[in-house]
Amino acid sequence: MAFNGLAIYDNFEGIGEDVSDLVAFLAPFETPLLDAIGMGDQPATNVKHEWLEDTLNPTTDAVAGAVLAADPTIDVDHASYFRVGDSIQVEDEVMLVTSIVDADTIGVARGYGGTTAADHAIDTAITIIGNAALEGEDTDEDRTTKQVRRQNWCQIMKVGVKMSGTAQAVGWLTTGDKLADAKVMRLRELLRDLEKTILLGRTDVSTIGSDTARRTMAGIVCSLSTNVMSCGTLTESALGNLLELCYDQGSRDVDLIVAPPNQKRVISGWNGSRIHVTDDANAYRNVVEIYESDFGAQRVIMNRWLSDDTILALDSSRIKVVPLKGRSFQYEDLGKGGDYARGQIVGEYTLELRNENAHGLMQGLG
């Protein structure tokens, strides 16, 4: 228990002389991630909160079988990614797609545009440069991508508040509305728990829907699967690799790096070699609050709730904390059964994490 200057013997008795009316409060309740991303523009309208995500057509694929320099066709992972008239590049060779043979094979003109036809190994990357249409040709294909429905569940968060009439009336070391003070403290706890749940929460879809099951939301860490890497030591190179993974997926707006205290100190330590202290300086500053790299500028925030071996690279524009309509945190009076005031603070929230491949996760840090 944090030291607060009070000598407490039971719930309502204490000895205090020359004790300030402002009781010290040291328990951690800050919510830096919630402060950074803010509240969603629209509330959820169902306990199963859904949204739609769309993507652009792919611009890369891979060779599915070894290719010889004289082959007029090549096997690819996804022939549907290609169109007749596409210019594609495999290593130093450019080809022109002349036909879509089947679901796994495309016909090509080799060594296009003066490049040299060559052998290519399986899994070699293919870059789709662009399509050249014929003059006056009809458009008889639909390249519209299919929207994907995503979801998360609303989680009820509540805490009770109960205080006897005597406790409200006596001037026990503090002044003011003690019931109101209790509400503030409990709300701080709920906000703290919401912050932790947004980061670390998990859901079990096999039990949700039962009247005996508790609905829980999925947090950020468990929702990321595309740009996930493991690294023993956090270095500038490793962080750059994580940001590059996000960039390669099309994300150019990663603006937050969330780090636990030990990893935040590592990032701030990168600034040590750049510090110049003059004789008249009366302050030593070694902190990184904004990290700028080839992949933009990211605000670095420290979060005590994140695991010590983890950092997150997030696009805050794609993350929203969403309350169920009419269910943001609020205090409700409950029926009295005696000489006390009783109520609860309750709210119902979920996390809307759009395009998980726009964000990055690094784990296994020492």
Image: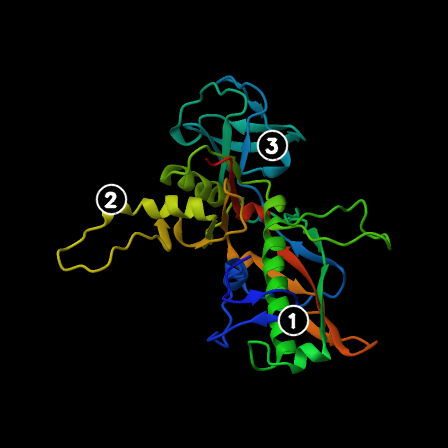
- Mark 3 vs mark 1, foreground winner is 1
The crowding category of the residue bearing disc 2, from other C-alpha atoms within 10 Å (few below 14, some 14 to 19, many at least 20), is few
Residue 132 visible, this orientation: no
The image shows residue 205, relative to residue 76, as above or below, that is below
- According to the picture, the residue beneath numbered tag 1 turns out to be 12
The numbered disc on residue 99 is 3
- Mark 2 vs mark 1, foreground winner is 1
- According to the picture, the residue beneath numbered tag 2 turns out to be 273
Percent position of residue 106, x then y: 60, 29
First in sequence: mark 3 vs mark 1: 1
The numbered disc on residue 25 is none
Percent position of residue 126, x then y: 51, 32
* Amino acid type at mark 1: Phe
- Mark 2 vs mark 3, foreground winner is 2
Percent position of residue 343, x then y: 74, 73
Q: Using the rendered view, name the quadrant where residue 166 is placed.
A: bottom right
